[in-house]
Image (spheres, helix red, strand yellow):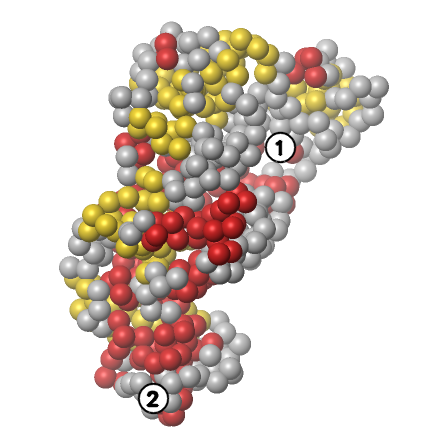
Amino acid sequence: MRGSTSHLLWTDDSRRGPAPGGAFSGAAGGSACGDLARISLTIDGGRVCGASFDAAGCAATAAACAAAVELADGATALDAARIGAADLDRELGGLTPSLRHAAGLAADALHRALASAAAAGVRLAEPDPNRALVAMSGGVDSATAALLERQRGAEVVAVTLKLWADRRTDGERSCCSPEAVVAARDLAHSLGLAHVTLDLERRFRAEVVERFVAGHAGGETPNPCVLCNGKLRIEAMVELAGRLGAERLVTGHYARIVDDGEGPLLAAAADPAKDQSYMLGALPPRLLSRLRFPLAELRKPAVRAIAERHGLPVARRAESQDLCFLAGEGKRGFLRRHGGLADREGDLLDSSGRRLGRHRGHQHFTVGQRRGIGVAAPRPLYVLATDAATNTVTVGDGEELRRTRVEVRDAVLHRPGASIDRVRLRYRSRPLACLPPEAAAGRHERLELRLREPAAGVAPGQLAALMSGEAIVGHATIA
């Protein structure tokens, strides 16, 4: 089919038609001219053994879809995952700027068909000890991790998660939106990498977002990133790695994996300003043996320098500070839309129960918060507690905030409690010395942690990372 744009005057209709039974299909559309593309793939033994398409709209879209199925049919699933819009453009001899959207639509449809196969649990490649699956969000950290793996000699396959699609969300600022998937795929293809999308949006909504909303409704400050890493996305990508024939999942997280002689454990990264071990603190050790963190010993400026040396366009990309599903909207509007948590006036109290003022809803406050309390006082005020049942917020001075005993629930100890000597109670806080709890390794409904120094801002719903020295040996939720 190689040639010039004159191929747009005809389309090979021999592959056009409805999707055959057992095929994985992907559709894309919605361009200004109303074009629609659908591509279906039959995959067996890691190879595309059948491909068909259908299209509506301009002739360019049909031609691009025909080119996509011609390139994919008979290829391995990994080779099909290397096909991008630029390949289809070349296959058609070079599309004019007004028609180039057709190649993008066909590429999207092809990769959504591959994503359907990835979500279905089929084997996509035979095992290869030299292959690594790299989680790519489209940012500099994950891209640099992919570069380092390739320099190590690994065959790198990239994966991007689609977790959230919402018209109110700024997809350009989210790491897991449809826009982020396309950007990460383009970046992976520019590096010559196969790219697979894993769509976990339904599970993410049910297991992470709904619990985030419910936590705020109940007066807690949940940490969705800990939940997402510990119970959803890392495990799903490790499972996908096995079906792609990769021994390990590689991510751009700043964290280390250590072994205390009893198995792998998480530990802090070399760069304390970027350390993400707290956010990964709920990962079970069985997954750590399948993970690699190439950035563990690097600092952020060194990572950006590596990306710049390799000409990556994301080398200086700014980092998003938002939760992926809040990007561009903010928590207040999100809770109102998705949880029905509208502003509702309530009393602002001091620790003796005296009314100091009014607030717009307990869900907008977290223990330890100082800004936005909304009342004048001769000394700084902090949120001491929130009560969902009465819609009250209690505030006081910094001394009232300090705690030496912390009750936690749903504790998981990978090592006996006697090994615990520190606990980290917030993402950007230092670990605090604590007395070892009297508890065996395993699960515990409730535990009490006794701190050797007072802690401020102990917020219910946040993770308590239980540590032995630098290693995380367990985790719990602050009750």
Decide: is 439 above or below 34. Answer: above
Residue 222, position as x, y percentages in the image: 52, 31
302 or 337: nearer the eye?
302
Q: Looking at the picture, which amino acid does disc 1 mark?
A: Gln
- Residue positioned 37% across, 36% down in the render: 231
Instruction: Give the SS element for disc 2.
Output: loop
89 or 372: nearer the eye?
89
Residue 265, position as x, y percentages in the image: 34, 27
Instruction: Give the SS element for disc 1.
Output: helix
- Residue positioned 61% across, 41% down in the render: 331
At label 1, counting other C-alpha atoms closer than 10 Å, the crowd grade (few under 14, some 14-19, many 20 or more) is: many
Q: Looking at the picture, which amino acid does disc 2 mark?
A: Gly
Quarter of the image with the N terminus in it:
bottom left
Earlier along the polypeptide chain: callout 1 or callout 2? 2
* Total number of numbered discs in the rendering: 2
Decide: is 16 above or below 122. Answer: below
Decide: is 382 above or below 361. Answer: above
Residue 91, position as x, y percentages in the image: 34, 81
Disc on res. 417: none
Q: In this view, does 138 lie to the left or right of 373?
A: left
157 or 261: nearer the eye?
261
Q: In this view, does 54 lie to the left or right of 205?
A: left
Q: Mark 2 points at which residue?
A: 3
Disc on res. 363: 1
Residues at marks 1 and 2 touching, judged by CB atoms closer than 8 Å: no
Residue 32, position as x, y percentages in the image: 53, 76
Decide: is 303 above or below 422. Answer: below
379 or 298: nearer the eye?
298
